[in-house]
Image (cartoon, rainbow, N blue to C red):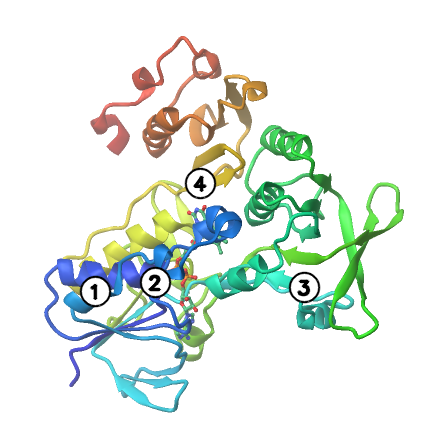
Amino acid sequence: MSDTIVIVGAGHAGGELASALRQGGHATRIVMIGEEAWLPYQRPPLSKAYLSSGGRVESLYLRPKTTFDAAAIEFIGGTRVEAIDRGAKTLLLGNGERLAYGRLALTTGTRVRRLTGTGAAEAERASNFHYLRTVDDVVRLRNQFVAGRRIAIVGGGYIGLEVAAAAVKCGLQVTVLEAAPRVLARVTAPEISAFYERVHREAGVDLRTGVELRGFEFSPTGDVVTAVLCRDGRTQQEQSVPVDLVVVGVGVVPNVELAAAAGLEIDNGIVVDETTRTADPDIVAAGDCTSHPNAIVGRRIRLESVPNAVEQARAAAATLCGRARPYRTVPWFWSDQYDMKLQMVGLSQGYDRLVLRGDPANRSFSAFYLHDGRVVAADCVGRPKEFMLSKRIVAARAQVSAETLADESCDLKTLVPPPEAAAA
Ligand code: FAD
């Protein structure tokens, strides 16, 4: 019987899991298999500094090849795992080979949500149409990131807005087309959306919300998108946005098909318990692809963030090393646009009151989301210290009055509950 641990998916979670296994004392064979050719790399710069400034792909690596080699972590890149035979405990690889495993870690992440409407399939074949998930996507996109060109970005979420900021920096003429009535509608309060809409417009972005995508126009040869067609939801006016390139950022979907075909439970992600175990005692899962219980939020969630991928991967490694511990962490995330860092903690859905601390006009403020008088989430713009304290306030779901939170003369430090209260 094999005692090999195989990790399927060599992204943030996969790379961290492999390293944490060795650090945790796991002595037998570790194999990490990735569909992409590259060693695990950081994705966040792909829509930020790496998009505007470039650099060697290796500069994005989580760890250099020498570190994985020194830890005797085998990497099979450019290879997809096609099937899991849980009975025989083998994997079928894209090249037709079979690989035996003793225990398995699924860190398959997410993939972009593709457009489905009129002309979408034809647009996907065009040379100037882009999605953004992998470093290969960015290499292709960056070749077309030339000052003066007109870029249309479909989607006003984090990725779309970050690409807009990078494009402005590179001198492109930027149009953002968002279907919802406001940008970042899924994740922030209207006040924060309004702030970012203003920032982007001040930077010269033609930002349109409430816009329905209707299709595309193509060059006579059909291989270049020349315009994006849409309709203004308010006026019902048809619009044609001439473009030199198009980037689509309309969300992601979890890569769960491999797990589903192997009979594992799926619920908007691979279902795991708080120690990252699936229903199969020999299979754990971590990162963007998992649906996991979160005691702080009080329900099952699936997160798309680096901190979750890294911390859940460490929990999975601990489980595989026989030291299972509950994965309990407050969700957090960040976004860089222009010279501003936004840091968010907690999940704001269902909040009943928003409290601003500081003035958005100064581009430095925090927004606290309250539910039943308790702080359930916070967005901090240009306030890293407040963010660190907010993490503890949100983790404790602290009860704080709106007036106190808004009062900048009141040190947030005094609002952080002592550890015993936080644990309660
Ligand atoms: P992934 O990084 O998606 O890695 C999964 C890997 O598994 C992929 O390489 C995939 O090809 C591979 N794979 C899938 N199926 C198979 C298979 N069957 N066989 C072999 N390999 C397989 N998060 C933040 O917290 N802050 C940010 O600012 C931020 N910015 C981002 C910007 C961009 C442009 C993108 C794309 C993401 C950003 N994220 C950000 C999200 C963050 O990158 C993800 O949450 C993180 O990468 C999740 O890691 P993961 O290992 O779970 O999945």
Q: Earlier in the sequence, mark 1 or mark 2?
A: 2
Circle 3 packing at 10 Å, graded few (<14), some (14-19), many (20+), is many
* Residue 96 placement (x, y as % from top left): 38, 91
In the rendered image, residue 212, in percent from the top left (x then y), is placed at 78, 52
Dot placed on the residue nearer the N-terminal end, 3 or 4: 3
Q: Which mark is residue 334?
A: 4
The amino acid sitting under disc 1 is Thr
Disc 4/disc 1 C-alpha distance (Å): 29 Å
Which residue is under mark 1?
Answer: 66
Q: Earlier in the sequence, mark 4 or mark 1?
A: 1
Compute the Cα span from label 3 to label 4.
29 Å
From the image, tell me which residue sits under label 3.
128
Can you tell which of label 2 and label 4 is closer to the viewer? 2
> Residue drawn at (80%, 75%), measured in percent from left and top?
221
Q: Is mark 2 within 8 Å of ligand 1?
A: yes
Q: Amino acid at mark 4?
A: Trp
The residue identified by callout 2 is 40
